[in-house]
Image: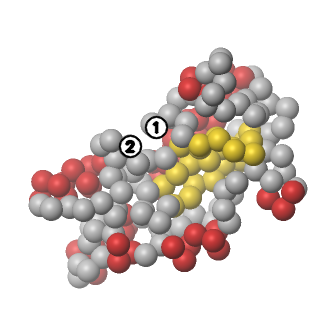
Amino acid sequence: MIINDGEITYELDLTDWFGHNFPEKEKKTIPWFKDQLWDYVKHSHKGIRYRILRMSWGIWNGYVYIPSGHPLHGKGFTEEDGEIDKLLVHGGITYNCLFDENDQSSDWIIGFDTNHMYDHAPSDKIRNEEGYNLAVKYYKTHAYVIKEAKNLIKDIKKKYS
């Protein structure tokens, strides 16, 4: 189950993130500090709900809610048909779980993260200018994850409509 906002926002300790001690003027040039801190919105695209959540180490994850009755509902990583693996999204599907927020929903959630090889988490150590330039290049912004979530929904609609 995806945890509620109040359960994780307190875990966002920006002092663990690279650049936290920079002067404000410089900090505003760092993508993970320019990005919004949290996304409280429960989004919808093409009739399918999704959420974008930030993890404590600074990366963004995307979660798509698959309604009961949909062919993907209940499909996990161990399914022989590999349907989950066929979905197109950054890094592939890395999360699946039944969602029952206060027992009011039977949605199945599939999700993806932005913490793969060549991605950058703000809490990663950066040792030199080259490392910083790569971090800026490979950090996935909130806008990027929104776009990926919408692309995932488009792929689901294309394959299962």
Crowding at dot 2, Cα within 10 Å, few <14 / some 14-19 / many 20+, comes out as few
Residue positioned 43% across, 75% down in the render: 13
- Tag of residue 75: none
Outermost residue toward the right? 104
Determine whether, in the image, residue 153 is placed left or right of residue 29.
Answer: right
Is residue 96 depicted above or below 84 in this figure? below
Determine whether, in the image, residue 56 is placed left or right of residue 160.
Answer: left
Quarter of the image for the N terminus: give it: bottom right
Are dots 1 and 2 in contact, CB under 8 Å? Answer: yes
x%, y% of residue 86? 57, 23
Residue positioned 66% across, 62% down in the render: 3
User: Where is residue 135, by image quadrant?
Assistant: bottom left
Is residue 6 depicted above or below 82 in this figure? below
Is residue 160 depicted above or below 57 in this figure? above
x%, y% of residue 141? 42, 54
x%, y% of residue 22? 23, 78
Quarter of the image for the C terminus: give it: top right
- Tag of residue 116: 2
Crowding at dot 1, Cα within 10 Å, few <14 / some 14-19 / many 20+, comes out as many
Outermost residue toward the front? 78
Is residue 140 depicted above or below 4 in this figure? above
User: Where is residue 129, by image quadrant?
Assistant: bottom left
Residue beneath label 1, please?
Answer: 90
* Residue 126 shows up from this direction: yes
Sequence-wise, the earlier of marks 1 and 2 is 1
Residue positioned 79% across, 44% down in the render: 107
Distance from Cα at disc 1 to Cα at disc 2 = 9 Å
